[in-house]
Image (cartoon, rainbow, N blue to C red):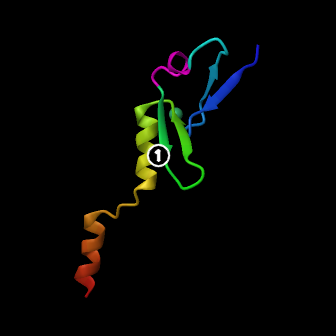
């Protein structure tokens, strides 16, 4: 039987998807993010909320307020 694997986008953990299982059964507990882009939307798999959050945090380049304030002091 053909075996399919998906990998967590954050930690690269692999999950085997047996051919006879529906994706909702095989991927119970996993999360999928659809990042819509013109042409080819990306489908990102995450093994846990923790991994998804780590990815979200890496996408949101938020500068801490304390850091920006230190620049004001120098003016
Ligand atoms: Zn993961």
Q: Please identify the quarter of the rendering in which residue 22 is found.
A: top right
Does residue 10 appear in the picture of this structure?
Answer: no
The residue carrying mark 1 has its beta carbon less than 8 Å from ligand 1: no
In this view of the protein, which residue sits in the foreground, 2 or 73? 2
Q: Residue at x 41, y 33 (%)?
A: 49
Q: Position of residue 74 (x, y in %)?
A: 27, 84
What residue is pinned by disc 1?
Answer: 55
Q: Which residues are magenta?
A: 23-29
Outermost residue to the bottom? 75
Q: Position of residue 71 (x, y in %)?
A: 29, 79
**Image height of 39 relative to 20, above or below:** below
**Image height of 50 relative to 66, above or below:** above
Q: Position of residue 37 (x, y in %)?
A: 52, 54
Q: Position of residue 28 (x, y in %)?
A: 48, 20
Q: Residue at x 24, y 73 (%)?
A: 69
**Image height of 32 relative to 16, above or below:** below
As for residue 56 lying within the magenta part, the answer is no
Which quadrant is home to the N terminus? top right
């Amino acid at each position: 039987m053909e075996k399919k694997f998906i990998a967590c986008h954050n930690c690269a953990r692999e999950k085997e998807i047996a051919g006879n299982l529906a994706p909702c059964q095989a991927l119970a507990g996993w999360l999928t993010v659809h990042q819509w882009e013109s042409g080819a939307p990306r489908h990102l798999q995450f093994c846990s909320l923790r991994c998804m959050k780590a990815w979200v945090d890496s996408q949101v380049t938020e500068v801490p307020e304390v850091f920006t304030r230190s620049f004001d002091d120098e003016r």
